[in-house]
């Protein structure tokens, strides 16, 4: 009797599923090499016995995978985060159990960079307030003091990885003066990209008219932007976040908008997302876009195909791509 096929489980967020029940993109890559099944979970508390027996798991964002859940996995070789960020997974606990955690770091580079620039342009040109005015049958440009000429502005990039570089080059092409802060890059990157490097975050915050965040969420970057950092910004500055919500302390940024300390914010991600109250949603000069910067028809298919390829390698015992926790 032939042994059963290995199981690749796809863990989708029960509150707002992003995959589809047929798993067509994944099946197209995996073929007959493994069974592919989708499970809707709010967290690892929802892991069934079948999930715990999977040989590999593909996990969409917003489903937390913690130490207790990882301990229940009986034969999982790899857990693949269907996206760039992996802060929803306890990677240290996974390492203790010999489970490789992988991500898909490059699938949405263009989309997230485009989204960051779109948010910056919407803020600098005040598109949403002008749209509301026109649709109320008015024609008064009340937001004129916030309307800016791009080539007079400094665009500050925090984190010059794939997405940060793509956003910086787009901003440069639009006429912004572009500066960046990234303590982990070697000397000379600024010369290769043709932008200005600053050595301290505070220096960037003091001179930037637009601050665009492109760093992962780690213990080092959690609340990287909080009350002290916001106090360094120009009163007319705009803040854009397409990285992870908790890189910015939510209460600090919302308070700064309510008091007029800064001119506006475009947040694709927020701490403890989504927004929790009507009061948060009513914050003035705030654009929020549902953690959608990564999303396009093309990017989702690329992401899912890459995750499926890594899961297939896992069940075949082949080398894995994009390991983030050091488990080979």
Image (cartoon, rainbow, N blue to C red):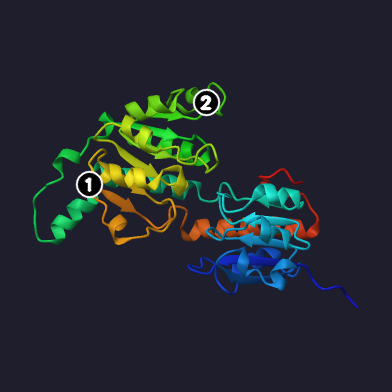
Number of residues whose C-alpha sits closer than 10 Å to that of mark 1, classed few (under 14), some (14–19) or many (20 or more): many
In the rendered image, which quarter contains the N terminus?
bottom right
32 with respect to 272 (left or right): right
Residue at image point 81% right, 55% down: 317
Number of residues whose C-alpha sits closer than 10 Å to that of mark 2, classed few (under 14), some (14–19) or many (20 or more): few
Visible residue check, residue 297? yes
Q: Is residue 263 above or below residue 57?
A: above
Viewer-closest of 169 and 139: 139
Viewer-closest of 304 and 11: 11
Viewer-closest of 327 and 179: 327
Give the number of the mark in front: 2 or 1.
1
Quarter where residue 154 is shown: top left
Mark 2 or 1, nearer chain start: 1
Residue at image point 37% right, 58% down: 275
The tag on residue 7 is none
Residue 70 on image: x %, y %: 69, 58
Q: Secondary structure at mark 1?
A: loop
Viewer-closest of 2 and 193: 2
Q: CA distance from mark 2 to mark 1?
A: 33 Å
Residue 121 on image: x %, y %: 30, 44
Quarter where residue 25 is shown: bottom right
Q: Is residue 66 above or below residue 266?
A: below
Residue 194 on image: x %, y %: 44, 26
The residue under label 1 is 126
Visible residue check, residue 176? no
Residue 295 on image: x %, y %: 46, 57
The tag on residue 189 is 2
């Amino acid at each position: 009797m032939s042994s059963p096929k290995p199981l690749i489980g796809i863990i989708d967020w029960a509150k707002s599923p992003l995959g589809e029940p047929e798993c067509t993109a994944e099946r197209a890559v995996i073929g007959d090499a493994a069974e592919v099944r989708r499970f809707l979970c709010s967290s690892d508390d929802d892991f069934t016995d079948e999930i715990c027996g999977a040989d590999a798991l593909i996990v969409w964002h917003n489903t937390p995978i913690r130490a207790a859940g990882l301990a229940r996995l009986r034969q999982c070789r790899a857990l693949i985060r269907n996206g760039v960020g992996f802060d929803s997974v306890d990677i240290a606990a996974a390492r203790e159990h010999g489970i490789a955690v992988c991500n898909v770091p490059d699938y949405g580079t263009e989309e997230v960079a485009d989204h960051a620039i779109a948010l910056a342009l919407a803020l600098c040109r005040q598109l949403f307030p002008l749209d509301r005015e026109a649709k109320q049958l008015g024609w008064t440009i009340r937001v004129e003091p916030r309307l800016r000429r791009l080539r007079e502005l400094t665009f500050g990039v925090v984190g010059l990885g794939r997405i940060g570089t793509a956003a910086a080059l787009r901003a440069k092409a639009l006429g912004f003066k572009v500066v960046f802060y990234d303590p982990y890059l070697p000397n000379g990157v600024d010369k290769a990209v043709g932008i200005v490097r600053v050595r301290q975050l505070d220096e960037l915050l003091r001179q930037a008219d637009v601050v665009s965040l492109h760093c992962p969420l780690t213990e080092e970057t959690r609340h990287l932007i909080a009350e002290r950092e916001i106090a360094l910004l120009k009163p007319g500055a705009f803040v854009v976040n397409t990285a992870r919500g908790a890189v910015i302390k939510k209460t600090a940024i919302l308070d700064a908008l309510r008091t007029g300390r800064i001119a506006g914010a475009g947040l694709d991600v927020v701490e403890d997302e989504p927004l929790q109250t009507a009061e948060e949603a009513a914050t003035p000069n705030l654009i929020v876009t549902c953690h959608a910067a990564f999303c396009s028809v093309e990017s989702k298919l690329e992401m899912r195909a890459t995750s499926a390829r890594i899961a297939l390698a896992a069940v075949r015992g082949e080398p894995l791509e994009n390991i983030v926790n050091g488990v080979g």
